[in-house]
Amino acid sequence: MSMSNLAALASATDAKANRLIHRLAFMNNFSDGQQDPEVAPLLPGYTFGQRLMSGLTPVERDGLLDFTIERPNGLDGWALLLTVRGRGLLLDRPGETVLREGDVLLVPPRAEHHYRRHDDSPSWWHRWVYFQPRQTWLPWLSWRGGGPRATLLRGQDDDFRHELDRIFSEIDAWSINADAFATEMSFNLLERAILICSRYNEKPVADYDPRLAGVCSYIAENIEKPLTLDVIADHARLSVSRLAHLFQDRYGCSVMAWRDDLRMQLACRILRMTDAPVKQVAIRVGYANPLHFSKMFRKRMGLSPSGYRQGESDVPAT
Ligand code: FCB
């Protein structure tokens, strides 16, 4: 990366952090912060409703954000954190873990996690993305040393760190854009960030199971067809019970739940990006009965397909 690009990158992060720090300096308590849309997600008790959200948390000694983020029950979705300045402290395991510049932390859903600024460091700035992954990302989210707890990825070179910082700030930039492509762009950028981390981590490669990858492609290519588990298992040359076991183990859900999620994610994209009637969307993603589709959609997204399209809620997006 050239020096001028590096400088531009550092200044994007610095500019955002300094702008936030300046605003935070005028806030006396959390309820002041809750009025500010950029600060509210950084405060305790915030509910992450959206499928993707990004931010920068510039913790400064004695500032409003200088507290321990305590999440004994974790979050509903995943979080990816990149320390960009100073040091933090991860407190969820015996013997604390110092988070240094360039360290990446991946926090799975419902994983207990607690962290704060390290006492010896005047600041701890970190960029983060909160997200509900696309189904196809799940294998890339199983990192070496990972499991039900937060996993640390460290020891990467400067290029890795700068690339991630750049991607995080681009995701941030898209998040203030309201057009239909903004969500696609953010998901596209996040997919790249996850791929980069996963590639450095290497575990997904070791874990790669071509039979399961084949199952996922087969389902995705035939998403509009009413495939049964028998047919899928047969295609993969596995018994139904073996497939169910392997899949659950690797993806943390059943084959059919994975397929239903994929259908809904696809439906969201079609609804957002086209004017196709809901009936057609239902058929395209595998529901011959539009009423059944609408019911499933509402169950998963909390609103009807047409409500989603009109952007009645800010829950959206896949
Ligand atoms: C913010 C925190 C940040 C990260 C995201 C998901 O409140 O400041 O560290 O945990 O939530």
Image (cartoon, helix red, strand yellow):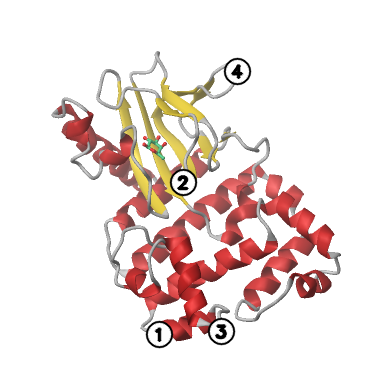
Dot 3: element: loop
User: In this rendering, does residue 187 appear at all?
Assistant: yes
Left or right position of 265 against 254: left
Mark 3 in CB contact with mark 4 (< 8 angstroms): no
Q: Which mark is residue 288?
A: 3
* SS type, badge 1: loop
**Is residue 87 visible to us here?**
no
Q: Are marks 1 and 3 in contact (CB under 8 Å)?
A: no
Q: Amino acid at mark 2?
A: Leu
- Looking at the image, which residue is at 45% across and 74% down? 294
**Mark seen at residue 164:** 2
* Residue 253 position (above or below residue 22): below
| Res. 258 image quadrant | bottom right
Residue type at tag 3: Ala
Q: Is residue 93 left or right of residue 174?
A: right
**Alpha-carbon distance for marks 1 and 2?**
36 Å
- Say which residue label 4 marks: 94
Distance from label 2 to label 4 (Cα)? 29 Å
Q: CA distance from mark 3 to mark 4?
A: 52 Å
- Identity of the amino acid at label 4? Pro
Q: Nearer the viewer, mark 3 or mark 2?
A: 3
- In the displayed structure, 219 sits above or below 75; it is below
Residue 234 in percent (x, y) is at: 83, 73
* Mark whose residue sits in front, 4 or 1: 1
